[in-house]
Amino acid sequence: MNCIFCNIEEPRIIDQDALFFVIRDGFPVTEGHSLFIPHRHAPTWFDLTTEEQTALSALLNKHKKLLQDADSTITGFNIGMNCGEDAGQTVMHCHVHLIPRRKGDMEDPKGGVRGVIP
Ligand code: 5GP
Ligand code: ZN
């Protein structure tokens, strides 16, 4: 299949379990920006099984801690998913963004993910 996440280069994988793998985003919004991707090709979060959705939570929690243990400047996170082209999705293989945030990384962070529509 012509899908970049189905054909990810092995060295890019920083962690994985039975259902998901984790990579650093190739075009990071902030340092540490990570993507959580199911091994199975499913287009969006809504196409995942309940088992996959549950497994993702544990992996997100694990990497939230790993990122903060490695970098004490990380003081917050945005978790995001673009589900569908009209929501901005460009790679049609489900992936969840975990974006570390740091105090002062933008002038006024108020609203966070509400900023998807400026
Ligand atoms: P989205 O579908 O979430 O809007 O965007 C796809 C995400 O995959 C972007 O954040 C992009 O930076 C990321 N990404 C990570 N690795 C790659 C890669 O090798 N190629 C492309 N095109 N996007 C990548
Ligand atoms: Zn795929």
Image (cartoon, helix red, strand yellow):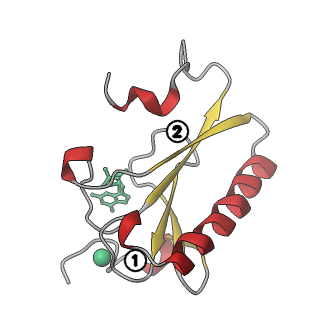
Instruction: Give amino acid for label 2.
Output: Thr
Q: Whole-percent x and y of residue 94?
A: 37, 66
Judged left or right of residue 7, residue 75 is: right
Q: Whole-percent x and y of residue 105?
A: 58, 23
Q: Does 6 appear above or below 63?
A: below
Identified at 54% across, 70% down, the residue is 53
Element on which disc 1 rests = loop
Nearer-the-camera pick, 118 or 4: 118
Q: Whole-percent x and y of residue 25?
A: 45, 55
Ligand 2 - quadrant of the structure image: bottom left
Identified at 75% across, 57% down, the residue is 66
Nearer-the-camera pick, 44 or 60: 44
Badge number at residue 30: 2
User: Which residue corresponds to mark 1?
Assistant: 9
Identified at 34% across, 51% down, the residue is 82
Which residue is farthest top? 107
